[in-house]
Amino acid sequence: MRRLLVLLAALGLGLWLAGPALSARPFVPRVVEFSQAIVPSTSTSTGTSTSSGHGSADAGGWRSATITTAKRFDLVGLTWSSPRRIGAHVRMRDGDSGRWSAWTAMTDDHAAGSGTEPVWAGGADAFQLRLTQRPPHALRARFVNATGSATAAQRVLTALRRRAHDAFVALTGAPARAQEADSAPAIVSRAEWGADQCRPRTVATYGSVQAAFVHHTVNANDYGPQDSAAIVLAICRYHRDTNGWYDIGYNFLVDRFGTVFEGRAGGIDQAVIGAQAQGYNSVSTGVANIGTFSTAAPSANALRATEQLLAWKLALHGVRAEGRVAVRSGGGDTNRYPAGTEVILNTISGHRDGDRTSCPGTRLYSRLPEIRRATAQLITELPPRPPVASVTLVAAARSIVYPQPAALSGVARAADGAALASAPVAIQVASKAGFVTLARAVSAADGAWSAQLASQYTRTVRAVVRPVGGAEAASPLLTVQVAPTIVARAPKRAVAGRPFAVSASISPPRSRALLLVARDGSDGRYHTVARLAMPGPAGHPRVTLRLRRRALHRLRVETTGDARNIAARSPDVLIRAVSAHR
C-alpha cells in the first residue's frame, strides 16, 4: 500500500511539474526579468578591475571588468538617467560553454538618449561593456530570460517540461496551422511565440498604412531557429517593461531563417499603430529583421520572407511597392524633420530615412532597391482577390457623452453590389485581445442596419457582415469618442472670505479633475481667478473654496482627455459671494 501511495504521489508530482507543457500549443517557459546597477571603477588603468566598481577608464573611453549576474540572461540592454549617447558595445559569456561572444554594438540612436536597443545573449551568465566615454549616471543593465534557463532549478524544470511537451505532441499530433486569409504568408501568431506573457497594457490604436519601414533589431546574428520565438518574446518584454511602451514596437519581425512573426497586437490585416518609426507610426507599418546588418549581410531567406510579407501587406492597403508618398512628420527627439514638415518617403523605406538612426544597418539598407523591385513583382503575382460582400459604418455622432449610447448604422451589400438582406452584422470594438463583438444587428431588405453601442470609454469600432455561404467582410474603422458626465455642486450663495465645499460627480470615474473659478467683471465678461486641483476618490472629487470678493462667480469642473475618455466640462454653476451681514 505504501509503495502504491509513493507511486501515486510521484505520478501526481510529475503531472504537476509537466502540466504547463501538456498542450498542443508551443511550450513557452516563464519569462524572468531583472536588472543590475553598473558601478564605474575609480581605477584609471585599462583592463584593471578594482573592488570599488566594475571597470576602468582610458583615453578612449571606459571598459568594464567581467560582470557576473545572479541569473542567466537571454537579452540585455542598458538604461541611464541623463539624455546622452554612450557608444556602448557588449560581449557575453555563455553559461554552458564559458565561451565569449564577439563584441556587439548596443544601438542607442533609436531612443531619446537614455537607453539602448536590447542585444540577444542566449543563456549568458556574465558580460563586459565597452563605452566611448565615462559611464553615465544611474547606468543599469536590464535583463530578460525567455528560455527558462535563469536558474539551475528552472533549467531542470524547463528540460522536463520540454520533453513532456514533445511527448504529448507526438502522442496527440500537432494541429496544422490555419491557412492565412487574403494570400498572407505563413505568420507565427502572438499566441505561438508566447505573447500571453507580454500582454498589451492598453488596446491597439489604428491609423493608415501609406508606407513600410524596414528595421533591424540589433541582435547578434548567430542565433538558431529554436531561439527566434524567445527573441521576439524577450524583445516584447523589454519594449513593454523597460522602454515603457504598451506592447512590442514592431508590427512584424522576420528571422534569418525566413520565419515571419506577428508583432504588435491588433490584427495583422489592420493598420495597427506601432512604436517603430517616431513621427510616422500612424501612417506606416514596421518590419524588423532579427539581427544586426551594419557589416553583416541579411540572409537570402530573410530577404525573401520580407519581400513576401511586404507584398501581401502593401497590396492589402493599396500601396505601390516602388512608389513615393508625402507624409506629415509628427516630430520627436529622434526625428530627422520638425513636426509638421512634409516628408517625401519611398513606400518601402529604411528607418533611417525618417529618423536619426543607422537602422536598418548599411548592408540591409543597401538592399532596399532590390526589396522594392522584388516586392512589386510579387504583388503582380498575387492571386486576384475575389469579389466579397461589403458593409459600411457611420455614427450619428462621433463624440458622445456617457451614458449616451453610440447610434451606429450602415448598409450591407453582396459581392455583386446588391443589397444584402437578413445578414447578421457584428459590431466589434478593438481590445487587448483583438476585436470583440459588443453588439449585433440584422440587415433589412435594402441592406440597411442600425445598432446602438453602449460604452464607458472611447472605442475603435468596425462592423462585420457574415453573409450565408460567403466570406465575412469588415467596414473601415471608426472611432467613437466618449466624454464623461460631470455634475458640479456648490451653494448658490457664499460669504466672501469664508470657506465652503465644492464637489463633483464624474461618470465614468476619473481620478483627476480641475475646478475653474471665474468672476463677473465690470465689462460683463467672466475672468478666471483660480484653477484648483480637486482631490478625493475617483469620480467624487472635492475641494474647499474661498471667494475673496463680493461678486457673481462661475464654477466649472473639467477633466483632461486621455486614451480612455476625451476632455469634458460640467455645466456652469453660478454662485454669488456676499458680505457677512446679509
Image: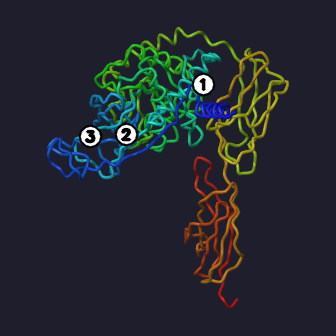
**Quadrant of image for the C terminus:** bottom right
Q: Is residue 328 visible?
A: no
Q: Secondary structure at mark 1?
A: loop
Instruction: State which tag comes first along the sequence, 2 or 3.
Output: 3
Q: Which mark is residue 77?
A: 2
412 left or right, relative to 317: right
Q: Is residue 421 visible?
A: yes
Marks 2 and 1, how far apart at CA: 30 Å
- Image location of residue 468, percent across then percent down: 79, 18
Task: Identify the residue at image location x=79%, y=34%.
Answer: 450
Instruction: State which tag comes first along the sequence, 2 or 1.
Output: 1
Q: Secondary structure at mark 2?
A: strand
**Residue where numbered disc 3 is placed:** 66
Residue type of the residue flagged with mark 1: Arg
Instruction: State which tag comes first along the sequence, 3 or 1.
Output: 1
Residue type of the residue flagged with mark 2: Gly
- Which mark's residue is nearer the viewer, 2 or 3? 3
Q: Relative to residue 80, is residue 382 depicted above or below? A: above
